[in-house]
Image: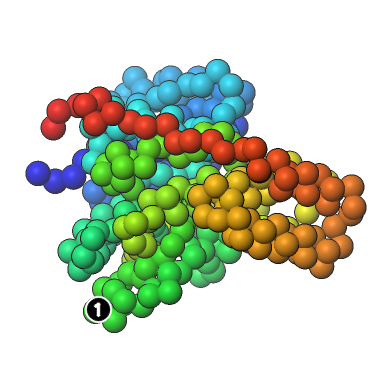
Amino acid sequence: MSQRVAAVVVTYNRLEKLKTVLERLRAQTTPPEWIVVVDNASTDGTKEFLAAETINDATLDLTRLEENTGGAGGFATGMKRAYELGADLFWLMDDDCYPEADALEQLVSGHAAAMEATPGGVPFACSLVYFDHNVLAEMNIAAPDWKWAGLWAQGHRAVFVQTCSFVSALYTRETVERIGLPLREYFIWFDDAAYARMAGAGIGPGVCILDSKVIHDTPTNVSGDFSKIDDQNIWKFAYGARNEASYHLHHESLLSYLRFFARTEILMHRGRVPWRLRRRITGRLLAAIRFNPQAERVAPAAGIAR
């Protein structure tokens, strides 16, 4: 039996971009069986638009949240819903991710080929993410594994990666049953990288499928690092500092946490980040000591019999 795919899209106040995402999903050469949309309490007409769409599209499964739970909460909710529907594969994306027509077909077939070639399996796969048709999206470049070229050397159009973003990421049902859902409490930033690391722990790296391509429709093509903090983005970096520090401390080691702490402080110094903003980030790094959320588990019996 072929594997059934649920596309999981989390949206918040980006109605026009969401419309493009839905168009691209429906135009796939191998469309997903379900399009699971989680609306994070949007206030821009998304609620009304999606309610009308569900009337004519039986594949569209809508969850409307009463408050904004961030990307992390949205993906946890969407993956849980897709699991309940009986999905075998979970294709995750933001509401500004535009997949090429064969992105899903290439992603699924590439992952299957990597699984056959890799003893122990491959816990996740991701697409190659572009800012436009010729330039990669800097914030979504998957972190390569030390043995990144192993599959490439065998003739596969794929490379091993340790982490990827939730911008066209594919996770298996087995992985979700093994590690649970993304950490809701992260709210935003590093929830995707943490989930990929959790998925690969004790198993091995994931893969980036080079012929599966998507566009990430962002205003600028700049990777976020702690040297670029300002008054407008400090709220995001505050989540990122706490979340990544927590992961290093509670899922890796004290040494890993201390290294991240030092690296963050050095980057803020090099970027001449104002002291008042640096103090806030340092406070979030320290808050990570007591911040250790646990993944919500799914019950295998909860899935629809296939």
Residue at x-position 20% and y-position 68% = 117
Q: Is residue 9 above or below residue 158?
A: above
The number of callouts visible is 1
Q: What residue is drawn where x is 34% and y is 57%?
A: 202
x, y percent for residue 22: 41, 39
Report the side of 129 relative to 284 (left or right): left
Q: In which quarter of the image is residue 291?
A: top right
Left/right placement of residue 135 relative to residue 275 reads left
Residue name at image x 73 percent, y 45 percent: 286
Q: Residue furthest left?
A: 1
Q: Where's residue 266, x and y in %?
A: 77, 65
Residue 269, compared with residue 13, is above or below; it is below
Residue identifier under label 1: 155
Q: Picture coordinates of residue 201 (x, y %)?
A: 38, 55
Q: Which amino acid does label 1 sit on?
A: Gly
- Per the image, label 1 sits on a secondary structure element best described as loop
